[in-house]
Image (tube, grey):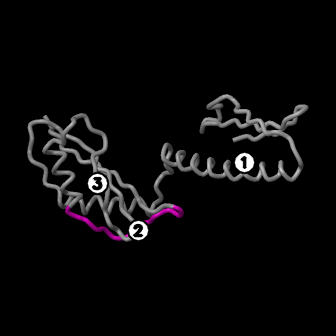
Amino acid sequence: MRIKFFTPTTQIFLVLASFCCSGQSCADELMVPIPTSTGTDIESRFARIEQKLDKIMSKLDHLERMINPPLPSEEELAYIRKVDEQVKSHWKPQTSNYSQNCDVVFNVNSSGKISGIRLGRRSAALPTPFEQIALEAVRQLSVLPPPPIRPGEEIMQISLHFGYNLLH
């Protein structure tokens, strides 16, 4: 984000331009007029604006991490593999005449408690029997070893892929 201050004859304008990850401008510049007055008053207004900008930047950083999450560390990958092995040991898919796939997404807090179990990408409105069995495999664990949680985060979100592929 760029911040520019300039003073035409009677007002100070705050100009904001936000940029996407690609560096391209996401929106036109936003000009916020700030009426001129005494120096102390302007300084306090700038301080309030700066505080609000800090909050906005924090929210933008959070959104950026959601849109483009950082790659998992080796420690996180090892943890996810361990969880995948535990979950798959409870997973007993029924045989079928066709291939089936689904993703189960869930959260693990710092003490290892599982919450927010849900299906990821889906094509049907109601869970299929195959998806129900995958969800149940995760529900059977209920608690896992504490995960490696990144600083500033409270949970680790995990997405596991379940697939039954019929070979012809």
Q: Are marks 1 and 3 in contact (CB under 8 Å)?
A: no
Specify the amino acid type for callout 3. Answer: Ile
CA separation in Å, label 2 and label 1: 35 Å
For the C terminus, the image quarter is top left
Q: Which mark is residue 49?
A: 1
**Which residue is the site of mark 3?**
117
Specify the amino acid type for callout 2. Answer: Ser
Q: Bounds of the magenta span?
A: 140-152
Specify the amino acid type for callout 1. Answer: Ile
Residue at 54% in and 45% down = 64
Residue at 28% in and 49% down = 118
Query: Which one is earlier in the sequence, the residue at label 1 or at label 3?
Result: 1
In this rendering, the answer to whether 112 lies above or below 136 is: below
**Which residue is the site of mark 2?**
110
Q: Which mark lies nearer to you, 2 or 1? A: 1
Residue 25 position, x and y percent, is 65, 31
Residue 42 position, x and y percent, is 83, 48
Residue at 61% in and 35% down = 22
